[in-house]
Image (tube, rainbow, N blue to C red):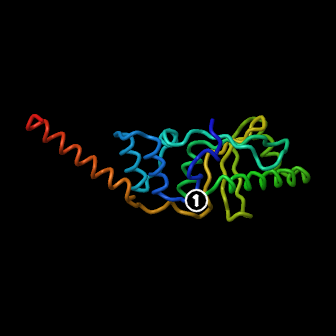
Amino acid sequence: MKRVSDLEPMLGYPSGICQVVQRIDEKIPESNLENYLINKVENAEDLEIDESSYIYPRIIEQPLEHNKIITVIELSSHAQYRMDLRGITTGDVKVAIRDFIKQFYNEKAQNSSQYLVWETAMRLGRDMVFLDKKIGGLFLAFVVHKGKAVVKTVYFENEKNPRPKTCKKASLRERLSSLKSRLNNYNATYGK
């Protein structure tokens, strides 16, 4: 597994549809799959979880502080896709996880019902959600089990997906693909 710092450019910056298209272009060789994914992203259609795994390998990150609850953060392929699309950095995710840990201990001190829900979910390895209002309403869906937090998706509350957009690189690739196709047809017709 890679560390986030290995990605260039970093996750979430710059952000938007063209950032995701650039990642597709870098990770997937020219093919029908590449064209399918680019068209889907440029039309502002969500990628399925298995589709995002072609572009983003799972990444392991160490949290900012040592603690007993979460010792490792894993960013799923889908979470990374959302981060690039919506301008969420690894630092944002780490801050939200740190804020979750603080809130977890606050709830534990009060023996609140929220603490019991989170503690049970961690013990059983079930999905949890956390909305970090301190950093602009960052929503995390994740699982914590045996010290590992697997972030499944992430987005800012009330933020919509970017609007459809055609990226220059993809447009050039489509024109090149069209030219190659016409050249192949010409060669097939005239025997060259």
Q: Residue at x 72, y 52 (%)?
A: 94
Task: Where is residue 63? Give x, y as percent.
Answer: 76, 47
Task: Where is residue 99? Give x, y as percent.
Answer: 78, 56
Q: Amino acid at mark 1?
A: Gly
Secondary structure type for disc 1 = loop
Q: Nearer the viewer, residue 78 or 131?
A: 78
Q: Residue at x 48, y 44 (%)?
A: 48
Kindly indicate the quadrant of the structure image that contains residue 91: bottom right
Kindly indicate the quadrant of the structure image that contains residue 163: bottom left
Q: Residue at x 65, y 42 (%)?
A: 3
Task: Where is residue 25? Give x, y as percent.
Answer: 43, 46
Q: Residue furthest front?
A: 192
Packing grade of label 1 (10 A; few <14, some 14-19, many >=20) is: some
Quarter placement of the C terminus: top left
Q: Residue furthest right?
A: 109
Q: Residue at x 37, y 53 (%)?
A: 170
Q: Nearer the viewer, residue 108 or 11?
A: 11
Task: Where is residue 149? Give x, y as percent.
Answer: 72, 42
Report the number of discs. Answer: 1
Give the residue number, with chain letter if any, for mark 1: 87
Quarter placement of the N terminus: top right
Q: Residue furthest left?
A: 190
